[in-house]
Amino acid sequence: MSSSPSISSPFSRSRTRLGKYELGKTLGEGSFAKVKYAKNVQTGDHVAIKIINRERVLRQNIMEQIKREISTMKLIRHPNVVRIFEVMASKTKIYIILEYVHGGELFDEIARHGRLKEDEARRYFQQLINAVDYCHSRGVYHRDLKDDGLLHTACGTPNYVAPEVLTDKGYDGTTTDVWSFGVILFVLMAGYLPFDEPNLNSLYRKILKASFSLPPWLSSSSKNLIKRILDPNPVTDHLVTESKEKPASVNAFELISRSKSFNLENLFEKQALVKKETQFTSRSSANEIISKIEETARPLGFSVQKKNYKMKLQGDRTGRKGQLAVATEVFEVAPSLHLVELRKTGGDTLEFHKFYKNFSSGLKDIVWTTEQTTEQTTEGKRS
């Protein structure tokens, strides 16, 4: 791909500053956002800054989607995924500071120079598989896999969308991403899209039937792989698992969008009224978590009521605003990862946080911490 950018050419003589960043040329522009080249004047590092028009975001009612996707990018740390460094905002704009990746978009290169050789396509495809497998392992599913998925609509670019997404009957994020793998692999090796029609109805009919033709120059192994991936039946390779009672599921986007270390509410709302609550994640089983919470709460003077992975902890002492009451619930993020939410339902907020400080010391064995600790405490105004 292209070489690293020169230090001076991307910047105009009248240089614009955004905090510690010096803005340069525009790299791309969309309907409600543009991406500019920039330099961190403190470190000399080059970044890309996505500048989003706040008014258009609100007008198009995509605020929640942007918040989820920004939060998701913050969660992901992988060499093949563009990294997000920080988010800033003014009254009219939202600024997303991203890792600058030189070389342009892969499919622009294909449009200019044609399809890739099989070995070259394999290399890019392996990088993609590696990155998305990492995302899946953290409960994050792309649904718009090509090379500029950030801030797309829920279904993404139609040419890459899996059949089950079009039927609007619910779908599994893993299988829809695998379908997109197949479309990407086809484009890399053929130089054009497998499903490409002038109107959406015709395009959707082809996708639903997986109606496509493989070019003759592909190797037999490549043809077989693409055919296996572009299977319109999403349950062909579905694994049958034992059905048993389990906690309610929570989407990974819901988990990370509430993270105190990356709270985006103030970017979009003048005043965010939040509940008094605390969350942590655990790799222990749901039953182990429930038992540990009960075991820890009782010595602190709390009675415990349990039902369907929900618990009510009731304090035996009367505080400034009556007895402290805490509701807890265990959610399943993934089979081996649970989110535990504790929410004050009675009593004083300050007393709740004092309680949790003591309470959490007894939960150390089950709390899962990462590079960025997932445990959070969100405080509103004292009630």
Image (spheres, helix red, strand yellow):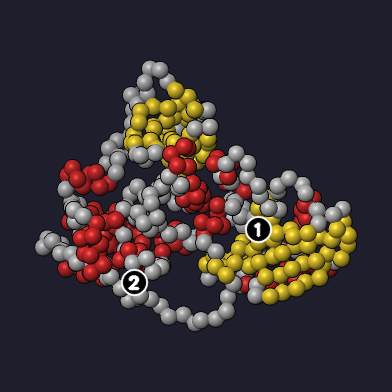
Residue drawn at point x = 41 percent, y = 61 percent: 133
Check disc 1 and give the amino acid type. Answer: Gln
Residue drawn at point x = 19 percent, y = 45 percent: 111
The percent position of residue 344, horizontal first and vertical second, equals: 74, 58
Residue drawn at point x = 68 percent, y = 53 percent: 275
Left or right: residue 286 compared with residue 150: right
Image quadrant in which you'd find residue 271: top right
Residue 279 - label: 1
Q: Are marks 1 and 2 in contact (CB under 8 Å)?
A: no
Left or right: residue 149 compared with residue 18: left
Task: Determine whether 380 is above or below 167 in the image.
Answer: above
Image quadrant in which you'd find residue 296: bottom right
Residue 234 - label: 2
Residue lying furthest right? 318
The percent position of residue 209, horizontal first and vertical second, equals: 23, 69
Image quadrant in which you'd find residue 37: top left
Considering only order in the chain, which callout, 2 or 1, is on the residue closer to the N terminus? 2
Left or right: residue 355 compared with residue 155: right
Check disc 2 and give the amino acid type. Answer: Pro
The percent position of residue 186, horizontal first and vertical second, equals: 22, 59
Task: Determine whether 49 is above or below 350 in the image.
Answer: above
Q: Name the quarter where the N terminus is drawn.
A: top left
Specify few, some or many for label 2: CA neighbours under 10 Å numbering under 14, 14-19, or 20 or more. some
Residue lying furthest top? 13
The percent position of residue 325, horizontal first and vertical second, equals: 78, 62
